[in-house]
């Protein structure tokens, strides 16, 4: 779990529970099993109803990706592409075929293999851009599941509150119980709003950020692959792809300048 996720979850739920306790409310006052069943079960049911089962099966993987996935290694990827460019420059483009077996990233391996196979640059670009577009569509589907959960949850909370108030109003024979009954009814709304804003929507936004990072990484690799195919000098390859890095990370890159110097124009 990355540090931002840990800090965010701790602050969000800590602030919520801390404020409740500071007001003097006992934690047991927030426990309402029927409300939890309605809000959580209803949200899950409505979500399953809204999406194909194949997408629902991916939810555990999406949660894992949102909460535990490591940030993409942009610097390492830039270094890898620069090293591939150097090797292709020295020994020819065909030598990269054996390098594809050692590449961990399937997208980069596929792109280099397409270049080695002799596909025209336009075909390589189109193939890889289609891969990126398909990736974005898969990510959007995952994001939309949790966005939907963030929409259903508060609504089901309101439904639970209305149901509780209806039950309370139908039993007015003991006015002394009205206060606790009203408070109990509003627990459902509390659950619905809390889960939506402190869990479902943050997961959806985290998935969106992960998607943006991955698309940026793939776009970087695409430009590097095409630059290698064009036979660009490693220094030129570096200058094309290093712009995708934040300024602070650019100094970390093992640049071509740290290797024996090669002229930009030969």
Image (cartoon, rainbow, N blue to C red):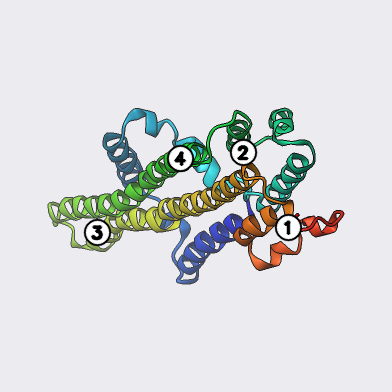
Q: Residue at x 60, y 28 (%)?
A: 117
Q: Residues within 10 Å of mark 2 (few under 14, many from 20)?
A: many
Task: Determine whether label 2 and label 3 are within 8 Å by CB.
Answer: no
Nearest the camera: 78 or 22?
Answer: 78
Q: Secondary structure at mark 2?
A: helix
For this view, does 202 lie left or right of residue 161?
Answer: right
Residues under labels 2 and 3: Cα distance? Answer: 66 Å
> Which of the two discs, 1 and 2, labels the residue nearer the N terminus?
2
Please tell me whether mark 1 or mark 2 is closer to you in this view: 1
Q: Which residue is denoted by mark 1 in the rendering?
A: 265
Where's residue 15, x and y in %?
Answer: 51, 66
Residue 139 in view in this figure: yes
> Which of the two discs, 1 and 4, labels the residue nearer the N terminus?
4
Residues under labels 3 and 1: Cα distance? Answer: 87 Å
Mark carried by residue 177: 3
Most extreme residue toward the front is 266
Q: Which residue is denoted by mark 4 in the rendering?
A: 126
Nearest the camera: 120 or 105?
Answer: 120
Q: Residues within 10 Å of mark 4 (few under 14, many from 20)?
A: few
For this view, does 116 lie left or right of residue 83?
Answer: left
Residues under labels 2 and 4: Cα distance? Answer: 14 Å
Q: Secondary structure at mark 4?
A: helix
> Which of the two discs, 2 and 4, labels the residue nearer the N terminus?
2
Mark carried by residue 108: 2
Q: Residues within 10 Å of mark 3 (few under 14, many from 20)?
A: few
């Amino acid at each position: 779990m990355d540090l931002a996720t840990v800090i965010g979850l701790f602050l969000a739920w800590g602030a919520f529970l801390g404020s409740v306790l500071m007001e003097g409310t006992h934690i047991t006052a927030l426990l309402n099993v029927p409300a939890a069943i309605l809000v959580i079960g209803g949200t899950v049911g409505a979500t399953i109803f809204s999406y194909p089962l194949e997408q629902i099966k991916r939810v555990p993987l999406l949660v894992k990706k949102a909460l535990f996935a490591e940030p993409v290694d942009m610097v390492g990827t830039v270094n890898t592409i620069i090293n591939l460019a150097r090797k292709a420059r020295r020994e020819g483009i065909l030598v990269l075929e054996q390098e594809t077996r050692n590449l961990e990233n399937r997208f980069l391996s596929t792109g280099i293999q397409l270049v080695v196979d002799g596909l025209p640059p336009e075909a390589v670009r189109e193939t890889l851009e289609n891969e990126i577009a398909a990736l974005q569509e898969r990510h959007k589907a995952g994001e939309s599941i949790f966005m939907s959960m963030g929409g259903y949850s508060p609504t089901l909370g309101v439904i639970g509150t209305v149901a509780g108030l209806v039950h309370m109003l139908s039993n007015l024979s003991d006015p002394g119980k009205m206060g606790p009954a009203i408070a109990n009814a509003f627990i459902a709304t509390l659950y619905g709003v809390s889960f939506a804003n402190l869990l479902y929507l943050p997961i959806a936004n985290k998935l969106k950020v992960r998607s943006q990072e991955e698309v940026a990484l793939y776009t970087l690799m695409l430009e590097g692959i095409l630059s290698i195919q064009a036979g660009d000098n490693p220094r030129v390859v570096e200058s094309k792809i290093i712009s995708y890095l934040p300024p602070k990370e650019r100094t970390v890159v093992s640049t071509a300048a740290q290797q024996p110097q090669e002229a930009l124009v030969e």
